[in-house]
Image (cartoon, rainbow, N blue to C red):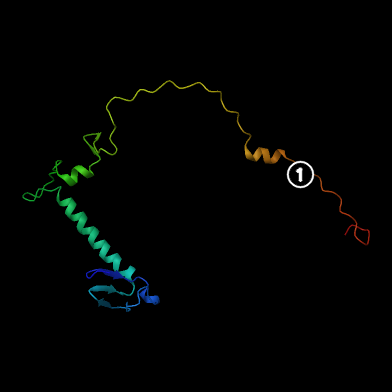
């Protein structure tokens, strides 16, 4: 790998996937960092929550005028324009907005013959009577037991 690359060995607690990883340590070999943190999933939760909170805070700051602290949405802002779905009772996001204001004309529906209704499964199962049991062949004793 090129110097500056990073390897995160998620299996270091069970022997690892990288021969140079060491449990609980960061090893640098030829400019490549090999991270061998123990309980890596436990570390990610706090980092991910913190990152998500910072992103939400930065996004919601766009809604407020910094001078007076009041709500002032700049509808021309690139991030707001990309995330707003509806405005003033209309769908405005291009991914979900109707293609045109006028409804598309449809071709008249073809007349088809109605399909035959199938019998419900429960009734069909009840309608079938089990075949009568045949008398078992008598055993050596001749008493049928």
Above or below: residue 48 compared with residue 29: above
Label 1 secondary element: loop
Answer with left or right where residue 28 lies relative to residue 63: right
Above or below: residue 115 compared with residue 8: above
Could you say which quadrant of the image residue 53 lies in? bottom left
Tell me if mark 1 has few (under 14), some (14-19) or many (20+) residues whose alpha carbon lies within 10 angstroms of its own: few
Answer with left or right where residue 93 lies relative to residue 118: left
Tell me how many marks there are: 1
Residue displayed at 34% across by 72% down:
39
Residue displayed at 18% across by 55% down:
57
Q: Spot the residue most to the left.
A: 67
Answer with left or right where residue 70 lies relative to residue 116: left
Image position, residue 90 (x, y; %): 24, 33
Could you say which quadrant of the image residue 124 lies in? top right
Check disc 1 and report the residue beneath it. 130
Q: Spot the residue most to the right.
A: 142
Residue displayed at 75% across by 41% down:
129
Q: Nearer the viewer, residue 45 or 122?
A: 45
Residue displayed at 35% across by 70% down:
10
The C terminus - image quarter:
bottom right
Q: Nearer the viewer, residue 4 or 80?
A: 4
Image position, residue 115 (x, y; %): 57, 28
The N terminus - image quarter:
bottom left
Could you say which quadrant of the image residue 35 lies in? bottom left
Q: Nearer the viewer, residue 82 or 66?
A: 82
Q: Nearer the viewer, residue 88 or 103?
A: 103
Answer with left or right where residue 72 lies relative to residue 127: left
Image position, residue 107 (x, y; %): 41, 22
């Amino acid at each position: 790998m090129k110097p500056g690359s990073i390897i995160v060995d998620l299996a270091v607690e069970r022997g690892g996937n990288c021969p140079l990883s060491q449990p609980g340590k960061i090893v640098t070999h030829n400019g490549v960092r090999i991270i061998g943190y123990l309980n890596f999933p436990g570390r990610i939760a706090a980092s991910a929550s913190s990152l998500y909170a910072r992103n939400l805070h930065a996004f919601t700051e766009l809604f407020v005028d910094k001078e007076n602290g009041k709500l002032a949405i700049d509808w021309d802002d690139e991030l707001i324009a990309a995330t707003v779905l509806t405005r003033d009772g209309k769908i405005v996001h291009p991914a979900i907005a109707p293609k045109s204001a006028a409804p598309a004309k449809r071709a008249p529906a073809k007349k088809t013959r109605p399909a035959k209704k199938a019998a419900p499964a429960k009734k069909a199962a009840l309608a079938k009577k089990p075949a009568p049991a045949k008398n078992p062949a008598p055993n050596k004793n001749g008493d049928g037991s």
